[in-house]
């Protein structure tokens, strides 16, 4: 008798399946605003999930041992993009609506059916959570691989037309300028902690772990950061951001490359930072993190062509474009051990004149010759520029002679 009763209930459920699906769609439209705002194709996909859920319930009620297969089948009928367009919370709302429609219809007929629909809804909810967890895991793995590819492209400088689209696919919130921070870390890095620290500092990150080398590409967030009072805070410099992230790196050199205009040009900052890491230990008592441009002398001595060009372009050439007395005063000041009196005697001027010229030099190039470390940078620039200038003259002499001979 019990079997006949169950068979009758199954037959009745099959007859009203279409009616339940229609009522569910109507209830979705009435109770869920996000459903009404979806494009027709997505609405159709959501309706398909609801209809499949009703059909799967009937199959489950006939054979409860098929729970795993039926629960997963509910969501396999939906297109993949549906998982990206509705959240887990919205999916649970969808399940609740379907359950309420079915329960309202079957509860008056049989208490056993009512208990069955509640039991089944629990299984479907767990299945939904599992589907979204797997999708999030797959998305996370894909993002990690894409992020590693982007960081590698920045390090090697092998960027192409696809780099901006790859950066956008990662959800990069950086706006405008960027810089690269390079240091060492353990093989397992707390990436979430790094991102939290950066977010609180108003920055976005791209992270690449290559063995024990940790590369972090920094960019300021386009969304203004607000303080506790709700007022927009002053954006931090990249050096200040790097200082906040420094505890996430292991002991050892930590070098911040120069600021570039945008993320696509970050390879120049990365090259400088990598070259700085290789020579950072040569500067005793260097700060941590240290700017790659503060390691220009060590980098130039190690054969870094970018460092030599930076010294020449940022220091030597701007001074050479000024009056010769500024260059001469700087040479004399450095050669005389940064002594104002000795420099003044050699140049036959008053020490205050030397002070004035050195202040002018600092205004032009941004480095102050009176500091020991900056004096080393300036002297390296003068040497590199002088070598480059004399070498250029020697290489041009044969051509000049050939032109003179032809004339």
Image (cartoon, rainbow, N blue to C red):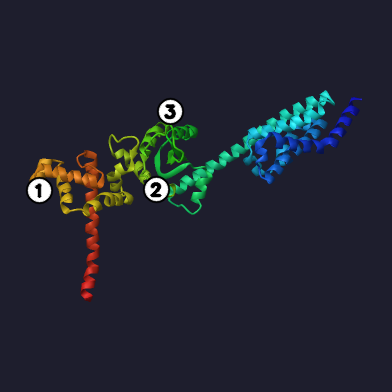
Residue 82, which numbered label? none
Residue 229, which numbered label? 3
Residue 347, which numbered label? 1
Quadrant of res 401: bottom left
Residue 322 vs residue 255: left or right?
left
Helix, strand or loop under label 2: loop
What is the distance, in whole Å, between disc 3 and disc 2 at their CAs?
Answer: 31 Å
Q: Quadrant of the N terminus?
A: top right
> Residue pushed farthest bottom?
407
- Residue 39, given in percent of the width and then of the height, sits at 66, 45
* Front tag of 2 and 1: 2
Helix, strand or loop under label 1: helix
- Residue 45, given in percent of the width and then of the height, sits at 70, 43
Tell me which residue sits at (87%, 33%) in the image.
12
Looking at the image, is mark 2 or mark 1 earlier in the sequence?
A: 2
Looking at the image, is mark 3 or mark 2 earlier in the sequence?
A: 3
Instruction: Identify whether 70 is placed above or below 161.
Output: above
Answer whether labels 3 and 1 touch (C-beta < 8 Å).
no
Helix, strand or loop under label 3: loop
Q: Quadrant of the C terminus?
A: bottom left
């Amino acid at each position: 008798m019990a079997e006949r009763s169950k068979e009758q209930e199954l037959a009745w459920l099959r007859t009203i399946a279409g009616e339940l699906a229609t009522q569910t769609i109507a209830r979705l439209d009435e109770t869920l605003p996000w459903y009404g705002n979806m494009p027709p194709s997505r609405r159709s996909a959501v309706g398909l999930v609801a209809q499949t859920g009703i059909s799967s319930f009937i199959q489950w009620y006939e054979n409860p041992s098929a729970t795993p297969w039926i629960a997963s089948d509910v969501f396999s009928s939906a297109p993949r993009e549906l998982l990206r367009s509705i959240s887990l919370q919205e999916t649970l709302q969808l399940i609740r609506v379907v359950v309420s429609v079915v329960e309202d219809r079957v509860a008056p007929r049989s208490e056993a059916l009512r208990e069955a629909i509640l039991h089944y809804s629990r299984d479907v909810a767990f299945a939904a959570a599992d589907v979204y967890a797997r999708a999030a895991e797959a998305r996370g793995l894909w993002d990690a691989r894409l992020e590693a590819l982007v960081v590698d492209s920045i390090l090697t400088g092998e960027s192409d037309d696809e780099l901006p689209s790859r950066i956008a696919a990662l959800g990069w919130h950086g706006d405008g300028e960027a810089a690269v921070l390079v240091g060492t870390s353990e093989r397992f890095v707390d990436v979430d902690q790094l991102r939290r620290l950066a977010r609180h500092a108003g920055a976005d990150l791209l992270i690449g772990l290559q063995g024990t080398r940790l590369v972090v590409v920094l960019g300021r967030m386009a969304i203004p950061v607000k303080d506790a009072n709700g007022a927009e805070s002053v954006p931090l410099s990249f050096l200040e951001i790097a200082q906040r992230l420094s505890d996430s790196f292991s002991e050892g050199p930590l070098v911040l490359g120069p600021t570039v205009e945008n993320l696509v040009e970050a390879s120049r900052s990365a090259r400088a930072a990598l070259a700085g890491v290789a020579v950072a230990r040569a500067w005793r008592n260097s700060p941590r993190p240290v700017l790659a441009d503060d390691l220009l002398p060590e980098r130039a001595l190690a054969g870094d062509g970018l460092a030599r060009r930076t010294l020449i372009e940022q220091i030597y050439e701007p001074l050479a474009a000024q009056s010769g007395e500024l260059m001469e005063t700087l040479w004399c000041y450095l050669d005389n051990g940064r002594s104002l009196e000795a420099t003044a005697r050699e140049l036959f001027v008053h020490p205050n004149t030397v002070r004035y010229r050195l202040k002018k030099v600092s205004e032009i190039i941004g480095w102050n010759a009176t500091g020991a470390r900056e004096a080393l940078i300036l002297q390296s620039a003068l040497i590199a520029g002088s070598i480059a200038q004399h070498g250029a003259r020697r290489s041009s002499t044969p051509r000049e002679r050939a032109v003179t001979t032809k004339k």
